[in-house]
Image (cartoon, rainbow, N blue to C red):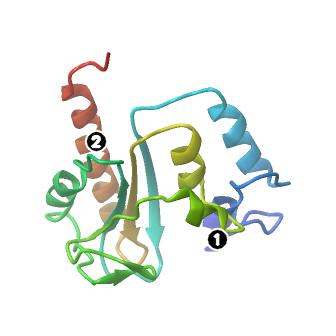
Amino acid sequence: YGWERNYRRNRQRYDINRQFRGRTDCVEANLVKRLLRGRRFALSFEMHEDVDSPGYYLYEHAGTNPTLADRILRAVAPVTPINRNSVIDGRRADGRGLITRPATWAALRQRPQWPMAYHVLRRHADHLIGSETPTRAPLARRIAAHHRALTVAVRYLTDRPPQS
């Protein structure tokens, strides 16, 4: 609904990606919560786009072992420009297209709304990548950037030794 109208909200005017803390009447968010219930994942990989960003960037939350960001940024750079700003989406970035925000649960409890990423990180995965393409880039370029990023993530998972 929102994509067809270039609008961030669903038909009921919910910003779906801000409906993941506590109870909500948002049907789509409740469906995702129900599908995830009781499951754990080695990695959560989210694909988004940013209407304000001049280039690609990503979030990585990985506890003590952030390892994917550099690989993803190297793979995506030939496809689309990287956002190298020191502040991206109102958050401090490292100047290479990476926002690392260690999720402190005390700080998250202060936020009235959570995106899906916080819900997943809190309950379903220890490692999260949020891949963000610039909305102003051509659709084919955005798809190629996400595809490269996802390919790197899948290779990372399949090359790792099994967890005991």
- Characterize the local packing of mark 1: few (<14), some (14-19) or many (20 or more) Cα atoms within 10 angstroms: few
Q: Quadrant of the N terminus?
A: bottom right
Residue 91, by quadrant, is: bottom left
Distance from Cα at disc 2 to Cα at disc 1: 27 Å
Residue marked by disc 2:
153
Q: What residue type is labelled 2?
A: Ala
* Left or right, residue 129 beside residue 106: left
Q: Which of 51 and 101 is in front in this view?
A: 101
Q: In which quarter of the image is the C terminus?
A: top left
Residue marked by disc 1:
8
Q: Outermost residue toward the front? A: 106
Q: Can you give x and y, in whole percent of width and height, for residue 55 in the image?
A: 30, 76
Residue at x 43%, y 41% (from the top left corner): 126
- Residue 42, relative to residue 69: is it above or below? above
Q: Nearer the viewer, mark 2 or mark 1?
A: 2
- Residue 42, relative to residue 111: is it above or below? above
Residue at x 71%, y 55% (from the top left corner): 21
Residue at x 26%, y 50% (from the top left corner): 66
Q: Can you give x and y, in whole percent of width and height, for residue 44 in the image?
A: 44, 42
Label 2 SS: helix
Q: What residue type is labelled 1?
A: Arg
